[in-house]
């Protein structure tokens, strides 16, 4: 983030975007779309975040494109955050961890998104394997969608919200790490005010800018004193400018400039 600026761009090959780019909704279209995003942005944005579902829907050939996308993006110097949102009982979580965080795995990524709703402790295999391999994990805490509050703002027995419990676990994982721990939290930029203690000691992935209605200027209000640890994420807001690589770069640059200005003015 320091070297390349505070921005994560999502690679979300929606069928509607493929159509807008003049591409077919097939494996050839998927391949061209992903390659174009990597070519335009992997040498300049801090993080690229492929959304696994948009590749999985094409079956094994789609997963093969995802593998190449991850490898090409990493080779060009971007960190890759695999947006897979995995979460399961611990013994199965170990297999998910092996899929994305084991050195030499075809889909090895710099980090993966995980869901803590089977209990934070169920994520242990991913947390441990990430640590072993110099990778990271981003844990859903306060998601950008309006439905998230029903579960995430619910109060636990001790009076803390579920989200706060997750955030506190993340802080414990990052204790002592400088300058940032490798366990991130996902906190939507759409929330208005996070209404939670965000002192996790790790990065805060902030999706929801662009298509979901949030703007860089909203970040200080949502994140307060933690805004310096925010990694804003934009998918459709950038991707809709394709397929021209110059236009994709311009859009990413504008979002990054907006974030810098918002953080500097806060
Ligand atoms: O983990 C995520 O990336 C994520 C968490 C969240 O709370 N909200 C959210 O929108 N996302 C993802 O971020 C991306 C947002 O896409 P856009 O709305 O097109 O920018 C999608 O890939 C979502 O799956």
Image: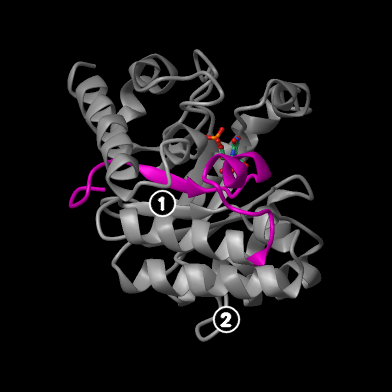
Foreground mark, 1 or 2, reads 2
Residue bearing the label numbered 1: 175
Name above or below for residue 122 compared with residue 125.
above
* Residue drawn at 75 percent across, 49 percent down: 119
Whether residue 128 is visible, yes or no, is: yes
Q: What range of the chain is rendered magenta?
A: 1-27
Residue 207 position, x and y percent, is 51, 34
On-image quarter of the C terminus: top left
Residue 206 position, x and y percent, is 47, 34
Residue 161 position, x and y percent, is 68, 25
Residue bearing the label numbered 2: 106
- Please identify the residue farthest to the front as the structure is shown: 22
163 or 172: nearer the viewer: 163
Name above or below for residue 99 compared with residue 209.
below
Q: Is residue 8 magenta?
A: yes
Instruction: Say few, some or many: other residues with alpha carbon within 10 Å of mark 2 (under 14 / 14 to 19 / 20 or more).
Output: some
C-beta proximity under 8 Å, tags 1 and 2: no
* Residue drawn at 70 percent across, 31 percent down: 162
């Amino acid at each position: 983030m320091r070297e390349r600026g505070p921005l994560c761009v999502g690679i979300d090959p929606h069928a509607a975007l493929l159509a807008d780019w003049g591409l077919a909704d097939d494996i050839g279209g998927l391949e061209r779309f992903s390659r174009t995003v990597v070519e335009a942005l992997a040498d300049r944005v801090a993080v690229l975040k492929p959304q696994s579902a948009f590749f999985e829907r094409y079956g094994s050939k789609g997963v093969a494109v995802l593998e190449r996308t991850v490898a090409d993006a990493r080779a060009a110097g971007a960190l890759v955050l695999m947006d897979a949102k995995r979460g399961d009982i611990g013994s199965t979580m170990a297999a998910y961890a092996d899929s994305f965080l084991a050195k030499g795995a075809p889909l090895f990524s710099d980090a993966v998104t995980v869901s803590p709703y089977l209990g934070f402790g169920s994520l242990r295999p991913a947390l441990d394997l990430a640590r072993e391999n110099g990778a990271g994990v981003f844990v859903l805490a306060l998601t950008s969608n309006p439905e998230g509050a029903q579960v995430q703002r619910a109060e636990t027995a001790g009076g803390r919200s579920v989200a706060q419990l997750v955030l506190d676990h993340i802080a414990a994982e990052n204790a002592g790490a400088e300058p940032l721990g490798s366990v991130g939290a996902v906190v939507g930029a759409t929330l208005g005010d996070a209404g939670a203690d965000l002192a996790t000691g790790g990065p805060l992935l902030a999706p929801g800018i662009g298509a979901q209605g949030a703007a860089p200027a909203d970040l200080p209000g949502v994140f307060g004193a933690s805004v310096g640890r925010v990694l804003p994420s934009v998918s459709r807001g950038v991707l809709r400018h394709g397929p021209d690589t110059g236009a994709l770069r311009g859009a990413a640059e504008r979002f990054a400039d907006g974030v810098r200005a918002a953080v500097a003015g806060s």
